[in-house]
Every structure is written in structure tokens, then in C-alpha cells.
Image (cartoon, grey):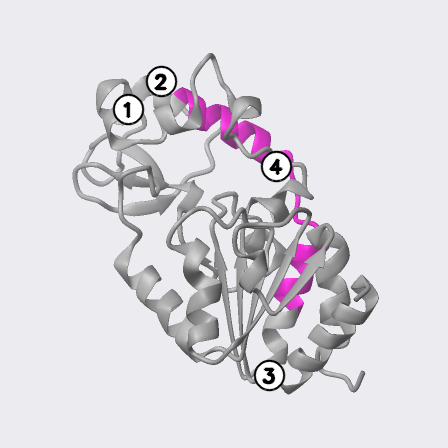
Amino acid sequence: MTNESVIKKVQHKLCSAKFVAVLTGAGISADSGVPTFRGAEGLWKQHRAEDLASPHAFAHDPKLVWEWYSWRRELIATKVPNLAHEALATMAGRFSSFVLMTQNVDGLHGMAGSQDCLEMHGNIWKVRCTKCFTVTENRDLPIVFPPQCSACGGLLRPHIVWFGEPLDPPVLDRCMHALQSCDVLLVIGTSGVVQPAASFAMMVKSAGGYTVEINLDPTPSSGSIDIVITGKAKDVVPLLCENSIQDV
């Protein structure tokens, strides 16, 4: 099937859907120029992301970790939402129920107008006090170390789910409800290897839902997805949105 034919098929599915869920990953933000910060291209001062994004790294050298996050924030601050982010913000108002889940921490969905996005891995523009656990927005550039909580003076940390940490239970619960209840799941720009998100499509299929993957390359989940569309998110997602409430 050509991309045009599979897009029309997905448009038909969306036209009849009442509850649509969306999962986005690094691929959607890559279209805005946001680097992945992982792998060989993500090396920073000879450190891998996996070596910096952990409770152990922060306990050992919080200044180094904050320097890395400050550098990341300065890069992300130059980026803007792309057409895929904007299309999803528009799509949200076209269904009885719509849930947007993201593995990204860049905040671009919110900038595009998406409301109540479930940020599974946190948000780089938020900080959490290590003493009183208060979460606040913080857009300081650069971060002056040590950043301190205005309420209690405790050391602030990025409000990010690090390696070895569990997802926020209320956020995960809302994701699970969406997966069990949605008619259609759109999986956009994810690697399909990071759990638990890597299992979301199979959860939806087990519950009787329809699954669509949009990605530049095949993922470990591609073989079990109902429809796979190859392409950039910024090119494909707006096409799905165009006719999602029209007869096609």
C-alpha cells in the first residue's frame, strides 16, 4: 500500500473514533531540530546521557548534572513547535475523548497549544525541590548553581524521570486508562524500545483498539501494528488531521 492509501485508511478510522490516544517520542521533536541527547551524537563533555540522567549522578555531582541540563535547555529554547505538534493540538478538540502522552521533556506540545499533555518523563522547564518536593516552572537561562527552592531553600533538581526512577503513578494511571479505552492509538516518532511506552501499542490491541505507527524507520513494534506510515511526523500528522472529522 502507498502512503497515500494508508493515510486515507487511517483517516477513515479517525472519522469513526470516539476516543483517540496519541503517544509521541523523540521523532516528533527531531522535526523541530531538537537533538536526541542520547547515543554517540549525544555525548557532552565525554559523558553519555545515561551517565548523567540518574539519581546517582546527581548525588555524586549535582553541579555537573545541572550544567548538562542548563546546556540542553539553552538548545531547546531556540526551537519551536512544528506542524505535527500544531496538528495534534487541533486534533484534540475533534473527538469526544483525546489523550496526548509524550516521552519528550521539551515542552513543545504545550507551546503548540496542547492542553493537559501527559509528560511521562517530566518537563525540562520544571524543577523539583529535593527537600520539600515542590514542583515549579523554571525557565532560567543559564541555571545558576546551586538553584534553590524559594519555599524552603532546598536544592532543586530537574523535574525529569531519570534512569532507575519510576514514572509518576498518577500519570501512568491516566496513560493506562487511555490505552484500555481508546478506539485508535497513534504512535508517533518513538523508538519502540523504552518501556513501558514500547508496550503501549500491544496493550491497545489487546483491548480491541486500532494502532497506527508513524516513523521514519521500522521499530520493534512495527510488525504487530495495524498500520505503519513511513515519513516525518511534520509531514504525515497534519494530513491525518485534515480529514479526521470529514467524510473521506
Residue 153 occupies which quadrant of the picture? top left
Which tag, 3 or 1, sits closer to the chain's start? 3
Quadrant location of the C terminus in the rendered image: bottom right
Q: Residue 219 carries which label?
A: none
Q: How far apart are marks 2 and 3 (CA)?
A: 47 Å
Image coordinates for residue 94, horizontal then vertical, percent: 63, 79
Residue located at (83% from left, 66% from top): 4
Residue 83 sits inside the magenta stretch: yes
Residue bearing mark 4: 34
Disc 2 crowd rating (10 Å Cα; few below 14, some 14-19, many 20+) is some
Q: Residue 17 carries which label?
A: 3
Which tag, 1 or 4, sits closer to the chain's start? 4
Q: Give the residues drawn in magenta, as a range.
A: 67-90
Which tag, 2 or 1, sits closer to the chain's start? 1
At label 2, the amino acid type is Leu
Which tag, 2 or 3, sits closer to the chain's start? 3
Residue bearing mark 1: 57
Give left or right: position of 30 versus 184: right
Q: How far apart are marks 1 and 4 (CA)?
A: 24 Å
Residue bearing mark 2: 64
Image coordinates for residue 209, horizontal then vertical, percent: 51, 78
Residue located at (77% from left, 76% from top): 243
- Mark 2 and mark 1 residues within 8 Å of each other at the beta carbon: yes
Magenta span dominant secondary structure = helix
